[in-house]
């Protein structure tokens, strides 16, 4: 399995087939005496499949007119466990090959980033318990964001690392939690970076002020409820505290970048100039900044630079 090759017995000999040549492996219903395993291969003349690797498709196209291809093979065994185990390993190998091919395709046009230079002799600006979007893995990614000599490093609680170089940041945004359930820092990059298994040009770090379900439940309470009034006061204090923490951290990142001769300046959306629109599928609040129109709360993120917005003549 390590070599991505399947050895299939043919007339007493072990014949190697690369896993990319196998279209699928199926187990027909067994009869009373035996179990079966059928291997179907990619061959010339078949309808193009999304599962076929580009190299395999090119190989078939190149040699299809002057070579013989095996279309399928059927194996029969009286010991069902062996063919079942073989079927399971073939499926696992195909899955690994597809994952490796997908990762290679994602990384094919990635521009290599410089290595992060960590600060050693100074106190590192750091902010913990941040949620990162897009998630690196699982349903949620939380961790710590640090500012270093030439970039930022996010380390998740699972010890997953994402580095963002100052030189690769095109727009940096700080959105306080005004009538929002989160306060966030957002980076729009010049070149995408790999986050988990996918490329992303937007990277965001946030802290939720209140859970959305809690906000809905509290909306049903009476406005004269003393507990509700106390909760609203605590929430206002929490929002103010989080805004101050994030704002101070942004200033620290700007100072570190400037000290090492990088330009990093955070922009804040103008909520009072916002308007509602449908950049994707849902109605969201679009807010202008000095250089962009953004919606950073809902996913997928929306960010368009103002110099790309059509002017009165309809030109970009």
Image (tube, helix red, strand yellow):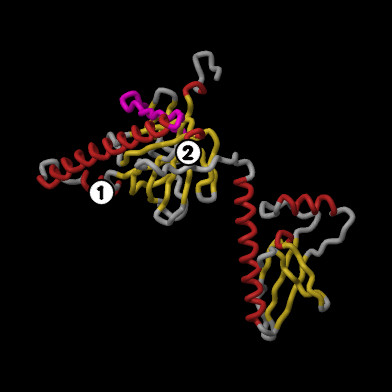
Residue 184: x percent and y percent?
A: 35, 38
On the image, the x and y values in percent for residue 59 come to 79, 53
Q: Is residue 271 magenta?
A: yes
The image shows residue 175, relative to residue 41, as above or below, that is: above
In the image as oriented, which residue stretches furthest toward the top? 313
Left or right of 48 in this view: 114: left
Q: Position of residue 18 (x, y in %)?
A: 74, 62
Q: Indicate which disc, 2 or 1, sits on the residue closer to the N terminus.
A: 2
Task: Specify the principal SS of the magenta part.
Answer: loop
Residue 280 on the magenta segment: yes
Residue drawn at (64%, 44%) of the image:
108
Mark 2 lies on a secondary structure that is: strand
Q: Is residue 60 visible?
A: yes
- Crowd band around label 1 with a 10 angstrom C-alpha radius: few (<14), some (14–19), many (20+): few
Check if mark 2's residue and mark 1's residue have beta carbons within 8 Å. no
User: Disc 2 or disc 1, which is closer to the eye?
Assistant: 2
Range of residues picked out in magenta: 260-281
Residue at figure coordinates x 55%, y 17% from the top left = 315
Q: Which mark is residue 214?
A: 1
**Is 23 displayed left or right of 123 in the figure?**
right
Estimate the spatial distance between the alpha carbons at disc 2 and disc 1, rounded to whole Å: 28 Å
Front one among 288 and 240: 240
Q: Is 126 or 181 nearer to us in this picture?
A: 126
Q: Position of residue 261 (x, y in %)?
A: 46, 29
Which residue does the image show at 64% across and 53% down from the upper left? Answer: 101
Give the residue at x 44% y 26%. 292
Which residue is at the far right? 66
In the picture of the structure, the residue carrying the numbered disc 2 is 202
Closer to us: 182 or 229: 182
Instruction: Name the secondary structure under disc 1.
Output: helix
């Amino acid at each position: 399995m390590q070599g991505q090759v399947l050895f299939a017995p043919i007339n007493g000999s072990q014949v190697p087939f690369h896993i990319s040549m196998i279209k699928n492996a199926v187990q027909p219903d067994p009869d009373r005496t035996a179990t079966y395993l059928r291997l179907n291969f990619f061959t010339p003349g078949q309808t193009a499949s999304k599962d076929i690797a580009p190299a395999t498709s090119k190989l078939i196209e190149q040699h299809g007119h002057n070579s013989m291809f095996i279309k399928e093979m059927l194996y029969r065994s009286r010991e069902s466990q062996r063919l079942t185990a073989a079927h399971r390993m073939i499926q696992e190998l195909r899955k690994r090959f597809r994952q490796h091919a997908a990762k290679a395709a994602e990384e094919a046009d990635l521009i290599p980033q410089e290595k992060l230079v960590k600060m050693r002799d100074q106190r590192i600006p750091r902010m913990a318990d941040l949620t990162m979007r897009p998630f690196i893995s699982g349903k949620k990614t939380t961790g710590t964001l640090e500012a270093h000599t030439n970039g930022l490093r996010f380390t998740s609680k699972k010890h997953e690392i994402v580095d963002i170089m100052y030189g690769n940041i095109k727009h940096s945004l700080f959105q306080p939690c005004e009538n929002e359930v989160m306060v966030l820092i957002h980076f729009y990059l010049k070149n995408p970076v790999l986050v988990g298994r996918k490329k992303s040009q937007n990277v965001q770090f946030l802290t939720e002020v209140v859970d959305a379900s809690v906000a809905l439940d509290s909306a049903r309470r009476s406005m004269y409820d003393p507990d509700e009034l106390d909760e609203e006061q605590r929430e206002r204090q929490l929002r103010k505290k989080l805004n101050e923490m994030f704002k101070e951290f942004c200033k620290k990142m700007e100072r570190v970048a400037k000290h090492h001769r990088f330009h990093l300046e955070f922009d804040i959306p103008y909520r009072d100039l916002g308007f509602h629109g449908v950049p994707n599928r849902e109605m969201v609040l679009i807010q202008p900044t000095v250089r962009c129109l953004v919606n950073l709360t809902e996913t997928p993120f929306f960010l368009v630079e103002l110099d790309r917005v059509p002017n009165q003549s309809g030109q970009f």
